[in-house]
Amino acid sequence: MKNSFNARRALEIDGTTYQIASLPALRDQGWDIDRLPFATRILLENLLRREDGDVVPAADIEAVANWDPDAEPSTEIAFMPARVILQDFTGVPAIVDLAAMRDAMVAMGGDPSKINPQQPVELVIDHSVQVDEYGSEAALMLNVEREFERNFERYAFLRWGQSAFENFRVVPPATGIVHQVNLEYLGRVVMRGEQAGETFLYPDTLVGTDSHTTMINGLGILGWGVGGIEAEAAMLGQPVSMLLPQVVGFRMVGALPEGATATDLVLRVTEMLRRHGVVGKFVEFFGPGLAHLALADRATIANMAPEYGATCGIFPIDDLTLEYLRFTGRDEALVRRVEAYAKAQDLFQDAATAKEAIYSSTLELDLSTVEPSLAGPKRPQDRIVLGDVHTSFTTPLPNLMPRTPSPAAADDGGGVAVAEASTAVAVTLGAESFEIDHGSIVIAAITSCTNTSNPSVMVAAGLVARKARARGLDAKPWVKTSLAPGSKVVTRYLEEAKLMDDLEALKFHTVGYGCTTCIGNSGPLPEPIAEAIRANGLVAASVLSGNRNFEGRIGPDVRANYLASPPLVVAYAIAGRIDFDMQNEPLGQDGDGNDVYLKDIWPSQDEIRATVNAALKAEMFETEYADVFTGDERWRALPIPEGATFDWDAESTYVQHPPFFENMPAEPPTPTDIVDARVLALMGDSVTTDHISPAGAIKRASPAGAHLESKGVTPRDFNYYGSRRGNHEIMMRGTFANVRLRNQLVDVEGGYTRYLGEGASDETISIFDAAMRYTEAGVPTVVLAGKEYGTGSSRDWAAKGPSLLGVKAAIAVSYERIHRSNLIGMGVLPLEFVDGDAASLGLTGHEYFTIRGLAALETFEAGRTLSVEARSGDGATKTFTVRVRLDTPQEVQYWRHGGILRYVLRQLR
């Protein structure tokens, strides 16, 4: 490694001498390091330590040291994360791909052991448990049993991976949510490792296969979510190619007022930053208000960086960081290393002496102005003040109603509503009879890493339940209630505070330790309720303490979804409807007939703080994480397949050898033009990865359901798409199959399109069937979309699926960062309309699209544009300009190789 800046320094800690790439050494040479944001300093250290004159030239280090906060990003840097973290939905296909790469390496005459993680990789199994059972003490046991029944093959495969690959560890099921386990246990803050025969200390940095990897930013660790494709490359030692980002400073002053929670704060922050515009940027929080935010509050805010659109939302390392590390049972020697290293590198913030950095732009929030809020019914940035929720529901209601086909309809739903504004329906569930209507809450879930990591809001939920129970209140019988703690520590302190009894009295029993409702694993509604919703076109609602509420995500029978703090989830379960005036209507009556209002059961901040201080103890973390990789008897009893390569089972419906390396030439071919492509789907704004990538339950009538039945799988055992992400046959059939997708080529919701190939009739068929017809006929396809295409989770199958369906290019108004990267990673060309969109250009989606000049893309050119010809059936042609979103030279290489995995394999052979 090179040392052009003479920045290698020795740092002695506890009698051990380490090497560091010193940032103060640059200051001594005249570089103004003090003006750099905290996150930019971490990037600078990353390059300084890894300078080699090739991947990291001295010019890149100078560019970061000279960072211009006002400049549009144009400098490409090669960031190398210190580790990678996976969850099982995205982690299983990542390990499947690595296993397939080993097979491909053998076929090419190479050494399969070269396909091996080059740095620590940890996978937490947390996305596979679903809420089948609820409202009983047996819920946890039954759900875990069902989880193992459904996922036996996947878990056995992961156990093989754990033994076959180096630097790969698995946290077994029923342990906790990946981001909370990362925050409470896996996060190092400062790493130590060997480089050129010497032991270095350096910042803990990471990428993860989940958007909410950013939660770790609350601990002062730089990391963000990437698709599984990009994570696999990082695992194999490939740097993350990125443009040196702008950094938005978010200054906080004051303290939260009585009645407001960290959830309310993050919804306000999300709203502000979405309005400001931070896509592709770093966000850094600073200011005197940080002193009033617990570490868990910081993590709550950092967690939702994807929702406000930023690459990360980072907080500095300070005394609070050290306190948290000690309290969560980290080794004292690690804490001392963190403190000494951070101070030696000017990465430690002392509130009394902190000098504010210079930012690309700055926002400020007085925490005392934060109000109790929800967000919904479709997007996390659509914040609604609590007092306005009951009236706000009526505005989106018409567009939330299910539609019947009606080409003449002028509404944006593509049809007319099938239900009236009020249509109360009688339902009998067991011994209970009641009515449900538009706005009835049928799911109330305390779930998701965003809030279950935060003791203050979890305890607040328990205290609301205790006070409600004391006044004789209960959850409504039509509400499916659930509690999914983010780690077993949460259960420990709720039990210590005697709050579990109160939560369970309102039927908030623990249903599992994992990401349940927020990821779409809410499980089926009771059939009488589901049937009433479907038969009558009701717009049912959910309230969850999560971070995602996109269409079709939470459950197929729920059309209005609202994010809320855990205590408000409990309150809404009692209210039973979203159009309830939470501030002025009584939740019910006590035993004496007195009205009980929300304010009567809401705990004070002093009460919450006192309960947390009394119930939460450091030894809880030490005990629960002492054997975190061991697992229970079910996990330990799983068979462990042997061998450097995996013995694929051709009959498996969970794990199949993917086709990404079939017929792969030794060298990448020259890119060829896309000629006479047809449109597979024409979509509007805010199409999310939930719309594109298979998620949620597999329907019997879907192509994936038909495929499973052909394999002898009964509908009861279909499981969720996420659990079958290791089987490309299922995933490609589920691509674009979301029940809420609105493809403007047809007049119905769901994964349908109009086949436009030879011999086509005016037939509406599934997108999968149409794609297979195009593929068989040798016809390329494209997708057209509006703004923020690919918003949402970092789902690799949102790119893998279209690639396998034959999509060669996407043309959108704009992209979400991760999805654009994933498309490139699978060899799909991302293009942007330069002027307008499909509608303003008069495109119907029935045209033949030709895109020429692709061979020239082999050489990088920033901001390159191409012309697209759209020819109608009558021969009339429209020409419009698109911008090529291959933003770095490395992205060009990934695309021309047919994707990042093929690129890496060719480099390693």
Image: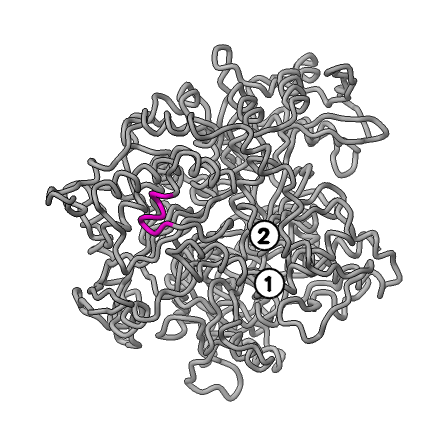
Is 769 placed left or right of 294 in the picture? right
The relative height of residue 600 versus residue 819 in the rendered view (above or below) is: above
Which residue bears the numbered disc 2?
Answer: 173
For residue 868: magenta?
Answer: no
Q: Are the residues at dot 2 and dot 1 in contact (C-beta closer than 8 Å)?
A: yes
Q: Secondary structure at mark 2?
A: loop
Q: Nearer the viewer, residue 854 or 346?
A: 346
Question: Could you say which is closer to the camera, residue 198 or residue 135?
Answer: 135
User: What is the distance, in whole Å, between disc 2 and disc 1 at their CAs?
Assistant: 10 Å
Q: Residue 626: image x %, image y %?
A: 64, 37
**Does residue 218 appear left or right of residue 156 in this picture?**
left
The residue under label 1 is 151
Q: Position of residue 733 (x, y in %)?
A: 55, 72
Q: Quadrant of the C terminus?
A: bottom right
The single residue placed furthest to the right in the displayed view is: 109
Q: Position of residue 307 (x, y in %)?
A: 43, 45
Q: Is residue 354 left or right of 263 when viewed as pictured?
A: right
Give the main secondary structure of the magenta stretch. helix
> Where are the magenta residues, as a range?
501-508
Q: Quadrant of residue 645?
A: bottom right
**Residue 331's spot in the image, x, y percent?**
65, 26
Name the residue rendered at 46%, 24% in the picture.
286
Provide the secondary structure element on which disc 1 rests. helix
The amino acid at mark 2 is Pro
Q: Nearer the viewer, residue 134 or 26?
A: 134
What amino acid type should be assigned to the residue bearing mark 1? Asn
